[in-house]
């Protein structure tokens, strides 16, 4: 009996030690459980697990952005560039920057246009008018803006016509529609020393570089290729 009594204090010490160890383990487990989120492979922090509440006043629905990437914000400029105004040089203006996105309509391309005469010489005895029609054959709506490039050509000379001093406006053409422009010219007698008789009119649509040839039917023209304000000139499309 004395031997059993001696073992009881030892058992009580062992039980107390086990109880203290269990409490320590529970405390460590509780501390480890308070960490939130984990690190993504890209260096960002993952969003909290489902059930975690978002803080009040913050943005909602945004995902974490990987390190090094730039998030696109709302309110930026939309698509749809502005159209370059025609240059002062004849032979067509610079290529348009307009596009079909953003609600705008693309410029008419030379390959999608038809070229024809509507009038080849109406008017007075001296100053006359030849009218060219540009027809949209592309199958979709497009726009024309500015002055066409117009050159009167024969076997020995090419005369690039100046532009009228008027402001052009944009013309929208549905498929099959046409827009006109006028060549105003000073008629001449064949035996006049200033007479120039073109055989061909070389036309470059606004904002294009590819030209199209039409035969000239207006007869001889007073050559004024060196004049500051010649009586032969071209109007913008739509005039």
Image (tube, rainbow, N blue to C red):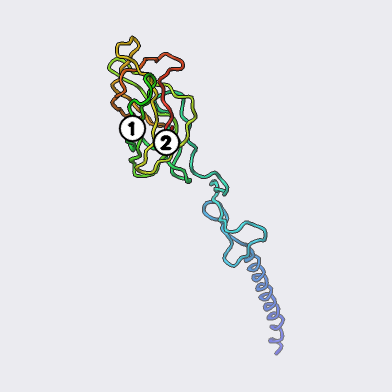
Taking 155 as reference, is 140 left or right? right
Taking 43 as reference, is 213 left or right? left
Q: Residues within 10 Å of mark 2 (few under 14, many from 20)?
A: many
| Residue farthest to the front, as pictured | 124
Quadrant in the rendering for residue 4: bottom right
Residue appearing at x 48%, y 24% in the figure: 165
The tag on residue 118 is: 1
Residue appearing at x 65%, y 71% in the figure: 26
The tag on residue 132 is: none
Q: Position of residue 5 (x, y in %)?
A: 71, 86
Q: Is residue 158 visible?
A: yes
Q: Is residue 38 visible?
A: no
Q: Which quadrant is home to the C terminus?
A: top left
Residue appearing at x 39%, y 15% in the figure: 225
Q: Position of residue 84 (x, y in %)?
A: 48, 33
Residue appearing at x 39%, y 31% in the figure: 181
The answer to whether residue 27 is above or below residue 166 is below
Discs 2, 1 touching: Cβ within 8 Å:
no
The answer to whether residue 87 is above or below residue 46 is above
Label 2 vs label 1, nearer the camera: 1
Q: Which is nearer the N-term, disc 2 or disc 1?
A: 1
Q: Secondary structure at mark 2?
A: strand
Q: Position of residue 91 (x, y in %)?
A: 39, 25
**Nearer to us in this view, 153 or 178:** 178
The answer to whether residue 139 is above or below residue 223 is below
The residue tagged 2 is 144
Q: Which quadrant is home to the N terminus?
A: bottom right
């Amino acid at each position: 009996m004395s031997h059993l009594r001696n073992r009881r204090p030892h058992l009580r010490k062992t039980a107390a030690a086990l109880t203290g160890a269990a409490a320590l383990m529970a405390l460590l487990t509780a501390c480890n459980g308070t960490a939130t989120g984990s690190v993504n492979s890209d260096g960002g922090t993952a969003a909290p697990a489902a059930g975690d509440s978002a803080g009040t006043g913050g943005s909602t629905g945004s995902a974490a952005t990987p390190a090094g990437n730039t998030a696109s914000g709302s309110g930026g400029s939309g698509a749809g560039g502005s159209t370059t105004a025609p240059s002062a040089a004849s032979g067509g203006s610079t290529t348009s920057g307009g596009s079909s996105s953003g609600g705008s309509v693309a410029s008419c391309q030379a390959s999608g246009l038809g070229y024809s005469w509507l009038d080849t010489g109406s008017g007075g005895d001296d100053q006359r008018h030849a009218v060219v029609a540009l027809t949209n054959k592309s199958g979709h709506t497009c726009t024309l803006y500015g002055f066409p490039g117009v050159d009167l050509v024969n076997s020995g000379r090419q005369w690039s016509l100046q532009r009228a001093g008027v402001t052009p406006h944009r013309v929208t053409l549905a498929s099959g529609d046409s827009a006109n422009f006028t060549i105003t010219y000073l008629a001449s007698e064949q035996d006049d020393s200033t007479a120039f008789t073109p055989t061909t009119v070389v036309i470059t649509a606004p904002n294009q570089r590819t030209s199209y040839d039409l035969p000239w039917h207006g007869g001889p023209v007073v050559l004024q290729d060196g004049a500051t304000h010649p009586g032969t000139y071209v109007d913008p499309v739509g005039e």
